[in-house]
Image (cartoon, rainbow, N blue to C red):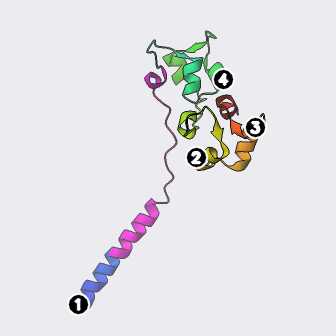
């Protein structure tokens, strides 16, 4: 009887471990697009180029989404574009808030040395927001 209890306990333990191991194999969900209202900081119902840039949307992606060419995005233009760039926000990587991303800050954010060097267009060893957002 004691052997049966041990057998049941071990079976349950291995089943639980297998379930946990299987669950850890599930890839994380893709990044979600920020809400329109979170990007539209002044609440005027439009996303300006400056608001888009602050949210991590590149100039090229902004122009592509601005279907009517008026220099701002409406809710429809924002929601109907597929150009969302899921890069972390510049300000979240720029830990010291100096307006530049250093190689150390980039590395801490998981940006490879190769990607950092490729983005550092002027070769000064740091990334401006324009360098960071330019593909």
Q: Secondary structure at mark 2?
A: loop
Looking at the image, tell me whether mark 4 or mark 1 is earlier in sequence order: 1
Q: Position of residue 35 (x, y in %)?
A: 45, 27
Q: Label 2 to label 3, Cα distance in Å?
A: 19 Å
Q: Secondary structure at mark 4?
A: helix
The residue at 43%/22% (across/down) is 37
Q: Label 1 to label 3, Cα distance in Å?
A: 71 Å
Q: Position of residue 130 (x, y in %)?
A: 67, 28
**Which numbered circle lies on residue 2?**
1
Of residues 1 and 50, which is closer to you in this image? 50
Q: Where is mark 3, residue-wise?
A: 124
The residue at 49%/18% (across/down) is 75
Of badges 1 and 3, the one in the foreground is 3
Q: Secondary structure at mark 3?
A: loop
Of badges 4 and 3, the one in the foreground is 3
In the image, residue 36 above or below residue 43: below
Of residues 80 and 47, which is closer to you in this image? 47
Q: Label 2 to label 1, Cα distance in Å?
A: 53 Å
Of badges 2 and 1, the one in the foreground is 2
**Which numbered circle lies on residue 109?**
2
Label 4 neighbourhood size at 10 Å, few (<14), some (14-19), many (20+)?
some
Q: Where is mark 4, residue-wise?
A: 59
Relative to 112, is 91 on the left or the right? left
Q: What is the magenta range?
A: 13-40
- CB atoms of marks 2 and 4 within 8 Å: no
């Amino acid at each position: 009887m004691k052997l049966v209890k041990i057998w049941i306990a071990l079976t349950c333990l291995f089943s639980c471990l297998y379930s946990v191991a299987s669950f850890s194999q599930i890839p994380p969900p893709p990044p979600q697009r920020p809400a329109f209202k979170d990007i539209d900081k002044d609440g005027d119902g439009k996303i300006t180029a400056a608001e888009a840039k602050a949210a991590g949307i590149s100039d090229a992606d902004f122009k592509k989404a601005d279907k009517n060419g008026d220099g701002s995005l409406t809710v429809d233009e924002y929601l109907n574009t597929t150009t969302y760039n899921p890069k972390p926000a510049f300000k979240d990587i720029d830990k010291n808030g100096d307006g530049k991303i250093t190689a150390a800050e980039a590395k801490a954010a998981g940006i490879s040395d190769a990607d950092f060097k490729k983005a550092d267009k002027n070769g000064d060893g740091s990334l401006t927001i324009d360098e960071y957002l330019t593909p």
